[in-house]
Image (spheres, rainbow, N blue to C red):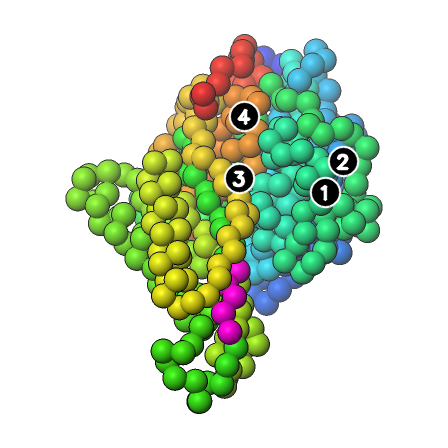
Amino acid sequence: MTDPVTDRSELAGLRVDGDRLLRRLDELATIGPIDGGGSCRLALTDEDRDGRDLVVAWMHDLGLDVTVDAIGNVVGVRPGRTDGSPTMTGSHIDTVATGGRYDGNLGVLAGLEVIETLEAHGIETEHPVAVAFFTDEEGARFPPDMLGSLVYVGGLALEEALDVVGIDGAVVGDELDRIGYRGTSPCPGPAPRAFVELHVEQGPVLEAEGTTVGAVTGVQGISWTELSITGQSNHAGTTPMELRHDAGHVAAAVAVHARGIAARLNERAVADGSPDRQVATVGRLDLHPDLVNVVAGSATLTVDLRNTDEDLLREAEADLAAFVATIAAEEGVEVAERTLARFEPVAFDDRVVDVVADVATRLGHTVRRMPSGAGHDAQMLARVCPTGMVFVPSRDGISHNPAEHTDPDDLVAGADVLLQAILTLDGLTLDRTDPNP
Ligand code: HGY
Ligand code: MN
Ligand code: MN
């Protein structure tokens, strides 16, 4: 251990050990590896368990006080001069099936790196510092996304979350038991005094502008709907078109219409000079019996709608619902709708956003303020404490794809901004004001 760093000017010069961070990212990526250098660690699978075990071992190696709560969220705390709520950082280590190695993982491992840097320099912070990974941030296996952090902040009852059934029929509570991560710490968890998350942007903005750091101002609204369509399977050759009740046709028409909703809203937004953009995605589409010569008797699809503006998101949802009702009547099929996730847009705390922007500038990085297109655990922590995020660029804006990549220098720059943001927040008095009234 080097001589303890005490005065604030020396603290300002502190930087992470970038090689150590990069080594940990590479080591975690060896768990659930997929072609192209990415990861598949769907929530609560064996791969997720193995990733959890590795990160928990690193937390213990750092001497952190590690707790696992009843939904499997894991928090490691390093004590400060005073007791009380920690300044928390973290993210998730579960991935989508075609995940990259940085989505979520960077935020957790950079948090570990921040703590190891504090430890290595003998720095005693005023407040405890915590690093967390939250269960099932992706929501790809068990919807909604951000399930663990939502329970952590009291946005979803624990019992309801434990009963969630996944796309493979597994149940959250059973899977937590199976992998040994149904902990004993109570949910909701204790609110941190502040939360700041480092994450790759997963979009094209920073790279396109040649900017290194994003000071994230908030997260757009998210609406996930599952549509279960029941028509009538029939012979593809003998059934006249006017006699069909083709679930496959309705599913495909909904997918095309969803795209049209985004096009229409965005055309209007551009004409109005509005920055709000609509996105629409049909990510899952299953037909039954899924055979070349059978009119599909049933179909299940998901529609992911997002917008930074809540009123526009509601307009998109209403448009979709109206279209579904119309085409279901025309085709003579039944459609059951199930909401898988619904989160309004979230604004982060200006004080934390300012800290991120100021620190990035002080460290000599280019920075811009921006909303997040992706959902993040930070949007849930924003319900209970002053919260912000740090973005670093994604090459070609690609994510949820093994080709996801961020230059090592940018990864390390993000971790340095996280370190200095946490030290800055440690010195602030942060009463709880609510940016999301
Ligand atoms: O869906 C999302 O935006 C996040 O990746 N869970
Ligand atoms: Mn993520
Ligand atoms: Mn993701």
Residue in the picture at 28% in, 54% down: 263
Q: Which residue is mark 2?
A: 70
Q: Tell me the mark number nearer the camera, choosing from 3 and 2.
A: 2
Residue in the picture at 36% in, 32% down: 369
Query: Which is nearer the eye, 239 or 75?
Result: 239
Q: Which residue is mark 4?
A: 383
Q: In the image, what residue type sits under mark 1?
A: Leu
Q: Gap in Å between the C-alphas at discs 2 and 1?
A: 9 Å
Residue range in magenta is 228-232
Magenta span contains residue 231? yes
Residue in the picture at 34% in, 36% down: 311
Residue in the picture at 63% in, 28% down: 154
Quadrant housing residue 365: top left
Q: Tell me the mark number nearer the camera, choosing from 3 and 4.
A: 4
Of the numbered discs 3 and 1, the one sitting upstream in the chain is 1
Q: In the image, what residue type sits under mark 4?
A: Arg
Q: Which residue is mark 3?
A: 376
Q: Tell me the mark number nearer the camera, choosing from 4 and 1.
A: 1
Query: Which is nearer the eye, 65 or 315?
Result: 315
| Location of residue 289 in the rendering, given as x and y in whole percent from the top left corner | 57, 76
Q: Residues within 10 Å of mark 2 (few under 14, many from 20)?
A: many
Q: Is residue 437 left or right of residue 192?
A: left
Question: Looking at the picture, does residue 70 appear above or below residue 435?
Answer: below
Query: Which is nearer the eye, 144 or 231?
Result: 231
User: Would the CB of label 3 be found within 8 Å of ligand 2?
Assistant: yes
| Location of residue 276 in the rendering, given as x and y in whole percent from the top left corner | 30, 40
Q: Quadrant of the C terminus?
A: top left
